[in-house]
Image (cartoon, grey):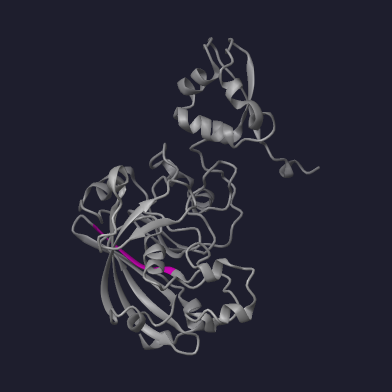
């Protein structure tokens, strides 16, 4: 077997002193929290998957070796291999490395075993940049884009610049002066929503608390959560400009100004307004229901003219601008050709 095909899943670790438990030894040496240890081990394979609670309570004797999952030992590390699609560099200046993130790629890995994120790519070309935020999975990412979303992604090269951007501005939009997205949504947004071609939309958001689940959205119509859950509400705001409407496919092209930064905000807010993003398998029930026949989909009305389900979600981070030391840094995507499938972009 080719040695390069070996996959290391566990590493032997021993200590130079005694500990009352393996958990105490890990807390004292690898620099991650108790909850992180339990999260990694509960998702482990083999013996760790079955009896991780018992193993954590085992006493540790000096020199005794324990085989531990590599995802635990390298919890905050980024794997030096990259196995994803090609990623274009939009800019590489004094403070920022700006990438053109492809769709269906994570911004950062959720474990050391993952090898297809943007941070894996950065480690292959500029490993020294990953010294920012060593104890954070996102490292120097100024923000995150959803797995399905493509477009401009900014990585901050220096810790002091990252901290300054995080602190400046305050309020709900401290990390970017302007954030512009393009999206294709079902229906004629301006007409069906009654909001016209240029509108500001505000909603309240709260999370189910489960990774990968939908964000819950409420309007400003008195439909609020009561009791303790009301404290979890966050206000989100979008400015939405309709650029075009494709009558044949019953789709609208929207230019979206993201004024706040809430997980899944654009996707959840547009779906709440009755205009889900084309190809959004989480928030668009029509797209999610793969068991329907093509004829059943076309009877659903809004957005049904596109026929077969699209291969990706039509949400793209088109332009981000950052204000730093009285200078504005503007980064614009080079690739919006996917939208030409339904619209003539040369007219905008």
| Whole-percent x, y for residue 153 in the image | 41, 59
Total count of labels: 0
Q: Which residue is farthest left?
A: 326
Q: Based on the displayed image, in which of its 4 quarters is residue 33 positioned?
A: top left
Q: Position of residue 16 (x, y in %)?
A: 55, 12
Residue 86 in the image, given as x and y percentages of width and height: 56, 62
Q: Is residue 57 left or right of residue 323?
A: right
* Camera sees residue 142: no
Q: Nearer the viewer, residue 139 or 38?
A: 38
Magenta residue span: 316-323
Relative depth, front residue between 316 and 281 = 281
Query: Dividing the image into 4 quarters, which one contains the C terminus?
Result: bottom left
| Extreme-right residue of the structure | 1
Residue plotted at (73% across, 44% down)? 5
Majority secondary structure in the magenta region: strand
Left or right placement of residue 174 versus residue 30 in this view: left
Asked whether 193 or 71 is in front, the reply is 193
Image quarter for residue 1? top right
Relative to 21, residue 314 above or below: below
Q: Viewed as shown, does residue 282 lie left or right of 223?
A: right
User: Visible in this render: residue 127?
Assistant: yes
**For the point 48% across and 82% down, which residue is it?**
340
Determine whether, in the image, residue 79 is placed left or right of residue 259. Answer: right
Residue 186 in the image: state x and y as whole percent.
45, 77
Instruction: Determine whether 95 is above or below 31 in the image.
Output: below
- Please check the rendered image and state whether residue 126 is part of the magenta-colored stretch, yes or no: no
Identified at 41% across, 68% down, the residue is 271
């Amino acid at each position: 077997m080719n040695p390069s095909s070996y996959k290391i899943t566990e590493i032997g670790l021993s200590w130079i002193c005694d500990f009352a438990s393996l958990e105490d030894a890990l807390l004292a040496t690898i620099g991650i929290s108790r909850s992180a240890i339990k999260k990694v081990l509960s998702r482990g394979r083999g013996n760790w998957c079955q009896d991780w609670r018992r193993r954590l309570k085992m006493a540790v004797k000096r020199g005794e070796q324990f085989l531990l999952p590599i995802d635990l030992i390298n919890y905050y590390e980024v794997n030096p291999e990259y196995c994803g699609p090609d990623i274009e560099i939009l800019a590489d200046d004094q403070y920022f490395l700006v990438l053109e993130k492809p769709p269906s790629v994570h911004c950062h890995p959720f474990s050391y075993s993952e090898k297809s994120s943007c941070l894996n790519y950065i480690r292959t070309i500029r490993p020294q940049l990953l010294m920012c935020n060593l104890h954070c999975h996102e490292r120097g990412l100024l923000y995150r884009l959803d797995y399905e979303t493509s477009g401009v992604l900014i990585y901050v090269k220096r810790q002091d610049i990252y901290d300054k951007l995080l602190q400046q501005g305050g309020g709900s939009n401290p990390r970017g002066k302007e954030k512009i997205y393009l999206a294709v949504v079902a229906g004629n947004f301006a007409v069906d929503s009654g909001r016209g071609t240029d509108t500001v939309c505000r909603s309240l958001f709260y999370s189910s608390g489960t990774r990968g689940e939908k964000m819950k959205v409420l309007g400003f119509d008195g439909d609020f959560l009561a009791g303790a859950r009301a404290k979890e509400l966050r206000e989100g705001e979008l400015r939405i400009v309709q650029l075009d409407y494709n009558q044949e496919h019953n789709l609208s092209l929207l230019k979206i100004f993201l004024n706040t930064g809430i997980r899944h905000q654009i996707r959840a807010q547009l779906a709440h307004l009755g205009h889900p993003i084309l190809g959004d398998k989480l928030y668009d029930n029509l797209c999610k229901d793969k068991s329907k026949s093509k004829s059943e989909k076309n009877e659903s009305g809004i957005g049904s003219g596109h026929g077969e389900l699209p291969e990706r979600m039509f949400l793209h981070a088109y332009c981000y601008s950052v204000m730093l030391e009285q200078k504005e840094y503007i980064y614009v995507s080079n690739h919006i050709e996917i939208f030409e499938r339904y619209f003539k972009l040369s007219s905008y």
